[in-house]
Amino acid sequence: MMGEALSPEEKHDIFTKWAKNHGVRINGVAPARFAGRGLGIAATRPIETGEELVKVPLSALLTTDSIPTPFRDLHGDISVHGLLTSFLAFGDPEDLSTYSPWIDTWPSPVDFAESMPIMWPKHELCPLPPSISGRWSTVNVHKPPTEESTSGLLPKQEAKFKKDWTKVSSVIPGADRGRYMYYWLIANTRTFYHELPGRKQKKKMAREDCMALCPFADYFNHADDEGVDGFILPTNKSDSLIIDHLILPHLSPHHKSLLEEAGYLGTYTLLPSGVCYRTQVALRTQTLSLEHWRLYVASGGVDLPAKVQERDERDAEEWLRTWVLGPWLREVKGALGRVRASGEKGWRGVVFRRWVQIGELLEGAKGALV
């Protein structure tokens, strides 16, 4: 991480001692606050390559096995996310007191209100990027409304929350929705992938149910360079845009069949360095004959005749500029204008910075599209 590391509040020192008492091994790192960037982890000494920084024993994890059996049984069929949330929100205070030093370090409801789109007013969601909202303002992606409305991360998140909340509110009379929402977001943002060891199950757990809260390790915020601000990373060399919705409508059923057979249907990505190879294979269905397309797939394009390769590179770049970069750039321009008009304070500032990042990614991709 970059920037000056400052000592955090005393509650983080108390929690660090709690974590160590629960078997967490901490080596050469400590929680720190970074001016203007929030909380994270800082090195307390030079770190050697391959050093183990933090090791958390299974006994310290908060999983569904940590929840008293009567409370688990009360909920019946519910997602792991929903059950963990219900325990944190409505579990017996005596059971939860064990985790108090840890809970005290978590983000506040105000923090989430400023950074999580699911908590923002519905009528103000129009500037969100399509990957979040599931909607475009300037692009007709030729999707049925029902599919478009659930294709973004936010609609999917809302659907999951609604399902969990419906279950919990039916078994815990008078449960407070706002309190449940807060802890649902805690679990949503701070859990790690975890499969319960030694558990015999009739069927394999869904990936989204393999989750656990992990003390101290949740200080690591996954930015590749600096801190995290809301739902964006200030800098992220791995930033990308999913462009399936711009590619797939142009593919005929025959082209989709060819791509599926070859293992290249869907998951098309635009990167700062250009487009991924899957995208290159897909768009060649638009620029090459079937014979040359099969040769492209087999050789990565290197075995194409020189003249065909030269023409193809030109056509592929033009196709991407017309059907991918053009729509995205128009969306960015319109969104920045709308956010500027409504002000850039609070959560709008987060949205504005994300749109700026998208614009920068698009500009970076211009010179290396194919």
Image (tube, grey):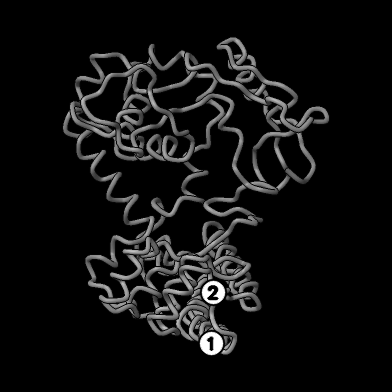
Answer with left or right where residue 331 lies relative to residue 247: right
Q: Name the residue under label 2.
A: 301
The residue lying at 43 percent from left, 77 percent from top is 293
Could you tell me which quadrant the C terminus lies in? bottom right
Q: In this view, does 73 lie above or below 175?
A: above
Q: How far across and down, in percent of the image, does residue 300 sit?
A: 53, 69
Which residue type carries mark 2?
Gly
- Residue 196 got which mark? none
Q: From this viewpoint, which residue is outermost toward the right? A: 46
Q: How far across and down, in percent of the image, does residue 280 sit?
A: 49, 72
The residue lying at 59 percent from left, 26 percent from top is 216
Q: How far across and down, in percent of the image, does residue 15 sit?
A: 60, 20
Q: Which of 322 and 30 is in front in this view?
A: 322
Category of crowding for the residue at label 2, using alpha-carbon neighbours closer than 10 angstroms: few (below 14), some (14–19), many (at least 20): many
Answer with left or right where residue 287 lies relative to residue 152: right
Tag 1's secondary structure? Answer: helix
Mark 2–mark 1 Cα distance, whole angstroms, equals 10 Å
Quarter of the image for residue 146 reads: bottom left
Q: Mark 1 points at which residue?
A: 308
Answer with left or right where residue 224 lies relative to residue 292: right
What is the count of numbered marks? Answer: 2
Q: In this view, does 118 lie above or below 273?
A: above
The residue lying at 56 percent from left, 59 percent from top is 350
Which residue type carries mark 1?
Val
First in sequence: mark 2 vs mark 1: 2
Q: Is residue 166 above or below residue 145?
A: above
